[in-house]
Image (spheres, helix red, strand yellow):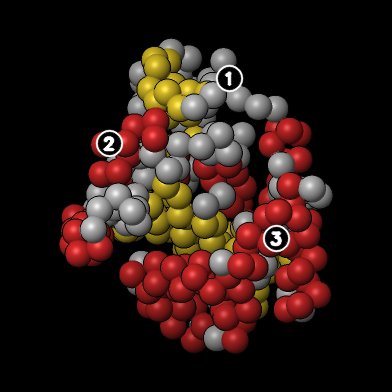
Amino acid sequence: MIPCTVCGGAVFKKSLRCEGFSYVLCVQCGLVQINPQPVQDDVKKRYQEGHGGDYLSYEIANESSFLRLQELSLHDAGFKHIETRFLQEGKNRLLDVGCATGALLEKLRGRGWDVSGIEISTPQAEYARLQRKLDIIDVPLEKAGFASERFNVVLASHVIEHLNDPGSFVRKVHRVLCPEGYFLVTTPNIGGFQSRILRGRWRSAIFDHLYLFSKKTLGRLLEDAGFTVEGIITWGGLAAGLAPNPVKVIADKAAKRFGFGDVMMIIAKKC
């Protein structure tokens, strides 16, 4: 067992039982995680050649729908206000960690951002470099060598739950952000409606997700690293197929309005 990445606690109890593996819950802060975990090198290999090629095909096939979801979430998070202010002030350096094929970065570049990306799946990084002429590196953030206070905005969509040490990752994001810079982090929400009713059958309870955060646990992780949480949005009331479409539409609207969605984005500002 490894200590809890949020509070350092060492006492856990059983949480979600899934097919072939299970999660535990830290009794001190409530963080849910796979523990013991696969070693870091094995985690990284899942996104490289062989596995990485599969990820590339999957991302290309779903690129347009993923991009629409990312743009909608940024809109709901009030990113336009951040964007307008920063671009007017010439503070336009943006990093997307886990940028996949670079579709979102290409859009943001067209709106005036000086964009950079990190994507540890080498096939996806190469695709973004060759097809979109983007500045993408295929090493983790801790090995990227970025100068302190280099970026005004850092995005990380569906990344933090895959990492062995999300606490270290959040601290490194804080280091590369300029004062008053923003970190927008998106991840599954274990405090949402779907996780509560489906438990180990929840679609985000998969072996690739080493951590499952709630608003409380991710908020604490960010605050302990020196961020102020300025907002939280959620979306996704019911997954497709769980209920008739009219019911799903109502559930999705309610999840977004009342904050019990399947996925969350936290908008954090560097203090």
Q: Is residue 267 visible?
A: yes
Please tell me which of labels 2 and 3 falls first in the chain.
3
Left or right of residue 248: residue 107: right
Residue at screen point 71% across, 42% down: 46
Left or right of residue 65: residue 163: right
Please tell me which of labels 3 and 1 falls first in the chain.
1
Residue at screen point 39% across, 72% down: 72
Q: CA distance from mark 2 to mark 3?
A: 32 Å
- Looking at the rendered image, the quarter that the N terminus falls into is top right
- In the rendered image of this protein, does residue 157 appear above or below residue 88? above
From the viewer's perspective, is the residue at label 3 or at label 1 nearer? 3
Q: Which amino acid is tagged 2?
A: Arg
Residue at screen point 80% across, 65% down: 126
Left or right of residue 240: residue 1: right
Give the residue number, with chain letter if any, for mark 3: 56
- Answer few, some or many: residues within 10 Å of disc 3's Cα (few below 14, many 20 plus, some between 14 and 19): many
Q: Which amino acid is tagged 3?
A: Leu
Q: CA distance from mark 3 to mark 1?
A: 29 Å
Left or right of residue 74: residue 178: right
Q: Residue 209: where, in percent of width, then height? A: 53, 38
Q: Residue 178: where, in percent of width, then height? A: 56, 63
Q: Which label belongs to residue 36?
A: 1
Q: Which amino acid is tagged 1?
A: Pro
Q: Which label belongs to residue 196?
A: 2
- In the rendered image of this protein, does residue 259 appear above or below residue 131? above
Per the image, label 3 sits on a secondary structure element best described as: helix
From the viewer's perspective, is the residue at label 2 or at label 1 nearer? 2
User: Which residue is more in the foreground, 205 or 225?
Assistant: 205
Tell me where residue 165 sits by quadrant: top right
- In the rendered image of this protein, does residue 43 appear above or below residue 87? above
Residue at screen point 40% across, 17% down: 14
Q: Residue 221: where, in percent of width, then height? A: 45, 39
